[in-house]
Amino acid sequence: MKCLAISNVGPIKCADVTFGDLTVLVGPQASGKSIFLQWLKLLEDAQYIRGRLAQYGVDWEGPPAGLLELYFGEGTGPMWRDGDGGSAIAVNGEPINGVEAKLKRGGRRRDEPGVFYMPAQRAVTMRDGWPRPFSDYGPGDPFAVRDFSDRLRILLGGMVRGQSELFPRTNKLKSALRTMLDDVVFRGFGLRVDRTYPQRRLVLGQDTANSSLPFMAWSAGQREFVPLLLGLYWLLPPAKLSKRPDVDWVVIEEPEMGLHPRAIGAAMLLALELLWRGCRVCISTHSPHVLDVLWGLQAIQRAGGDWKDVADVFGADRTQSLKPIAEAGVSMPTRRVKLT
């Protein structure tokens, strides 16, 4: 998909977006940023979504309003309006006729999502320090939240076999990124799995202390950032692969939530790693700091700067491990979009 146009859908009067490698949606609260990005996933992954819901006994049938409520969440069905001057969607300039048929049969057939979606409600996906399963949610909860939460649960089930340390972890992230995250997010604490009780949980601890901090004792920023980090871990493929073969898009809603400006910069640097790996990234934001980072990258591009200038923008060390990621910031186009 190169372009997506949506009109008269919920709060969106008109949104006509041509995607770049990095596309950032900016707008006030309840302006439709999440709705737009969830439509992107729905149109790309309709078959996958239908299959996931069927696994848990949810039949994706009936009129569009009912289908939308299963996907977007309870009470969202009326966002779609039929008739003259009603809702309309076009993909790559071609109008979609018959949205019901598109939702039931659209998208590629595959077992894995083509759009990996990290919702703004990341913190609520963790219960007692462990991701909640898909079935722990109600049928009226947004699909993006349910699927993201279950992905993290499956990820952790595979990662913690044989070891408990999740951060820092040498086979995940480049050393420059680990150093920066340790400085601005974890502050010397390691992220690990606590097996003291029958139910495993994530805790923060230090090698020099015997105590550990449970999830609810973390800072607000740490509670928001850890699911984002785990989502990135899921996206990082096995050795010798640049990215998961099925994933074309990564959506990150409000990466700034709960974070200090330097930590927001670290989150944006993680987005550049995804670009370097060949993913197209879409971000929604309210943060002027995210926009400052974009402005800095565009200024470097216009001035003919190089990867060292990008490292300086993020306050990161100019190490060779950071070079390919930083180069993505000066070689790939960005698009900033304001929804109306």
Image (cartoon, helix red, strand yellow):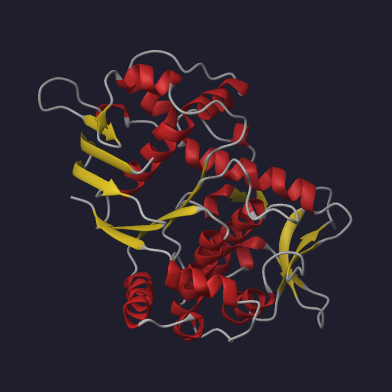
Percent position (x, y) of residue 340?
18, 50
Residue furthest toward the top? 62
**Whether residue 292 is situated above or below residue 46 in the rendered picture:** below
Residue in front for this viewpoint, 214 or 293: 293
Residue furthest toward the right? 162
Q: Is residue 128 visible?
A: no
Percent position (x, y) of residue 58?
53, 20
- Please name the residue shown 64% across and 55% down the image: 242
Percent position (x, y) of residue 216?
61, 62
Percent position (x, y) of residue 116?
53, 45
**Whether residue 272 is situated above or below residue 115 in the rendered picture:** below
Q: Is residue 74 visible?
A: yes
Quadrant of residue 222 within the rendered picture: bottom right
Say which quadrant the N terminus sits in: top left
Residue in front for this viewpoint, 68 or 266: 266
Q: Is residue 285 left or right of residue 197?
A: left
Quadrant of residue 285 within the rendered picture: bottom left
- Please name the residue shown 52% across and 53% down the image: 279
Residue in front for this viewpoint, 17 or 203: 17
**Whether residue 105 is situated above or below residue 291 in the rendered picture:** above
- Please name the residue shown 60% across and 57% down the image: 232
Q: Is residue 84 left or right of residue 198?
A: left
Residue furthest toward the front? 304
